[in-house]
Image (spheres, rainbow, N blue to C red):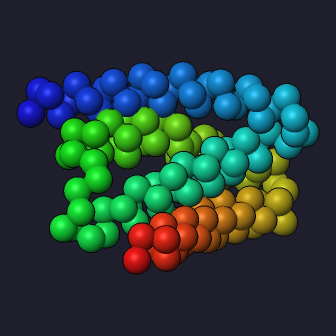
Amino acid sequence: MIDKFFFIALGAAFGGYIRVYLSKLIGNNIKSKENIVIYLNILTCFLAGLIFSLEKDQSIYIFSRRINDFLVVGLLGCVSTYSGFAKEIIKIFFDKEWLKLIIFIFKSIFGCLFVIGISYYLVSTFIN
């Protein structure tokens, strides 16, 4: 059990660094700060879709359970920004920008579902 927490914590440490780095990199190139949250979530969903697709066939063990804990729970869990997503929703809500709020939620949720599906499909197609 201790080694599971170690791998998750190690992934989270790297994920936190990557999140800060990518936030600054993306933030320097876009005007709308809430889009940083969307881009980070879409990136992590794409990568998660790749990993989930590789795990689909249980007869193929691409990653050990500890590597999966490191990648999915630790690293991608820290890079993804649910707390940032919630913060942006509250901020837009209190600014009473209703159309912007609807568009932000729509882009975040459906964008992430779309890229998970695409990455899952791509890997499944190339493996089979």
Residue 117 in percent (x, y) is at 54, 72
Looking at the image, residue 89 lies above or below residue 16? below
Q: Is residue 99 visible?
A: yes
59 left or right of 122? left
Residue at figure coordinates x 90%, y 39% from the top left: 31
Q: Residue 17: which quarter of the image?
A: top right
How many numbered discs?
0
Q: Residue furthest right?
A: 31
Residue 98 in percent (x, y) is at 81, 63
89 left or right of 61? right
Residue at figure coordinates x 43%, y 36% from the top left: 75
120 left or right of 30? left
Looking at the image, residue 44 lies above or below residue 5? below
Q: Is residue 94 visible?
A: no
Quadrant of image for the N terminus: top left
Residue 53 in percent (x, y) is at 40, 66
* Viewer-nearest residue: 34 or 125: 125
Q: Residue 107: which quarter of the image?
A: bottom right
Q: Residue 119: which quarter of the image?
A: bottom right
